[in-house]
Amino acid sequence: MPKLVRFGVSMEEGLLARFDALIRELGYSNRSEAIRDLVRERLVRHEWEAGEEVVGVIVLLYEHHKRELPDALIDLQHRHHRLVIATMHVHLDADNCLEILAVRGPGPELQRLAEHLRSLKGVKHGQLAVTSTGRTLP
Ligand code: NI
C-alpha cells in the first residue's frame, strides 16, 4: 500500500463550491478521491501528449455488407500488429458489425491508426479511448 501524504490546497470559495457540487453529482464520497482522479487523468493525458506508451481501445461500427471492408480492416491491423494486441468482433444485427481493438503504443501512433481505420469506406463511426499502461500510475 503506497504511503498517503496529506496536503493543503487553497482556492476561491466559489470554485470550491462548484467543485463540491460537481463531485457530489458524479457520486464521489469525498474530495480526496475526486482530486486523485483529476491528477491521474492529467498524468495520463501528459503521457499521451508526450508520445509515451499508452494502452487503449478503438471501437469501430461498420457496415457488414461492404464485402471488401473486413479485408481492408484486417490488412491494416496486420500492418500495425505491434500496436494491435487483441480484437473482438460482434455481429450487432443483420447489417452492422462492431469491432473492438485493444491497442498499445505511443499515443500519436494509436491516434493515426484509429484515424486510418475510421477513414475506410463503410466505417460508420470510430473512436479511440486511452488510458495508462498502469506501470507509471500509482
Ligand atoms: Ni459481423
Image (cartoon, rainbow, N blue to C red):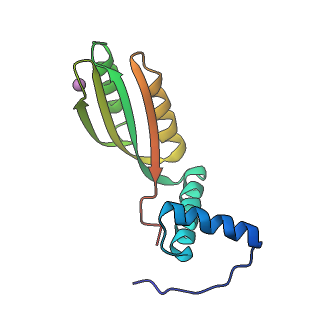
Answer with left or right where residue 9 lies relative to residue 131.
Answer: right
- Can I make out residue 117 in this image? no
Q: Is residue 98 above or below residue 23?
A: above
Quadrant assignment, res 91: top left
Q: Residue at x 23, y 24 (%)?
A: 93
40 vs 68, nearest the viewer: 40
Quadrant assignment, res 76: top left
Answer with left or right where residue 27 lies relative to residue 6.
Answer: left
Where in the figure is residue 127, as x and y percent of width and height? Answer: 45, 36
Where in the figure is residue 112, as x and y percent of width and height? Answer: 51, 34
> Ligand 1 lies in which image quarter?
top left
55 vs 93, nearest the viewer: 93
Quadrant assignment, res 34: bottom right
Where in the figure is residue 105, as x and y percent of width and height? Answer: 44, 48
Q: Residue at x 31, y 33 (%)?
A: 99
- Can I make out residue 87 in this image? yes
The residue lying furthest to the right in this view is 12
